[in-house]
Amino acid sequence: MAKVLIQDSMSPAQPLLCVVVPCYNEDAVLRETAQRLGALLDELAAMNRIAEKSQILFVDDGSTDDTWQIIRELAAMPGSRAGGLRLSRNQGHQTALLAGLLSAEGDVVVSVDADLQDDLNAIPQMLSNHALGSDIVYGVRSQRESDTALKRITAEGFYRLLDKIGVEILFNHADYRLMSRRAVEALREFDESNLFLRGIVPQLGFPSSVVRYARSERFAGESKYPVSKMLALAWQGITSFSAAPLRLITALGMAVSIISLALGGWALWIRLLTDEAVPGWASVVVPLFLLSGVQLLSLGVIGEYLAKVYVESKRRPRFFVQDRIHPVTECIVTNPRAFDKEVRQSVSGD
């Protein structure tokens, strides 16, 4: 049986940090990400900014390339800070990120993408803000020069739209953030399956602050967020946190009713006062087209909300952990619950 090392008590000045990195087919960039994060954690530990046993937790979201094999190699290296969590299947970025946050050990947790577009040098400033009392520190992009014009316009338009319909969200903030242990435990109370963490985290209400950074080009590999996934995430954010589309249907229905009445009056005026009317055309075709389009649109929006209620009502587990690697023990845990029980027994002396 692998020896389990118990975390020593530490002063508040040296928080135990865990950096959570969700990964999906990131074998092209993973080693560089681990090297940069490891060097940063070593530097912060040498400066007594974080605890010596601070770690990196890579979350493999059902990758089909060599991502998990690389994570195993990184965890097996002497002095490595890298550990791994492997989900049983691909669940999507938001679920993989949540799995990492809820599985991370430590006083503070920082989430960052594996592509190295987020500036890792913002982490020391996040720790400083946390030391000053912030339970949540948001990494916010100061510019989007690395994005294409289309992506920049659509992304910024998305944030403005969410703000207009009443969704509490930070402009130009993605999923680069620091969370205290208290904030992570509060996040654990959210059981919803339709995840949009950028909207959920601000609802926690704990003291927060912002650190701005410049976003870089992707180090290697291809983006795992094509236009289709970006649109799906945007729609998820809108429908998970706002009933505005449903209210828009009501307003649209009223507008169409008024237009239909106006068209009916116009058709009646043409019929009674002129000889230019085509019998039956205006009174049938125009209202038919208008009403059919509105009905189909309304059914689609209502169906989206009903689908979310359907998914939530099933209460299915959001993810399953297939394997977990701890860098301290250098072992693969195939049964995370049994491992957690083993840790508790070691602590209690049973």
Image (tube, rainbow, N blue to C red):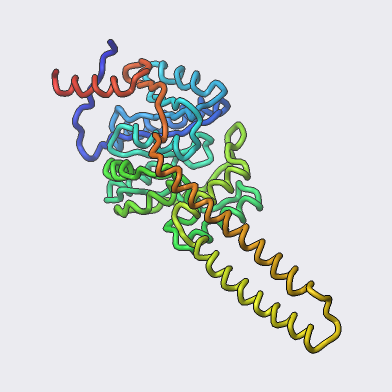
* Identity of the residue furthest to the front in this view: 279
Task: Return the residue nearer the eye: 329 or 154.
Answer: 154
Count every numbered label the image shows and give the total: 0
Left or right of 32, for residue 127: left
Quadrant in the rendering for residue 257: bottom right
**Is 261 located above or below residue 177 in the figure?**
below
Would residue 345 be visible to someone looking at this image?
yes
Q: Position of residue 243 (x, y in %)?
A: 46, 60
Left or right relative to 49: residue 36: right
Residue 298 figure quarter: bottom right
Q: Residue furthest top?
A: 1
Q: Position of residue 137 (x, y in %)?
A: 37, 49
**In the rendered image, is residue 39 in sight?**
no
Classify residue 97 as left or right of residue 216: left
Q: Quadrant of the C terminus?
A: top left
Between 99 and 295, the one nearer to me in the picture: 295
Residue 138 image position (x, y, % from top left): 40, 49
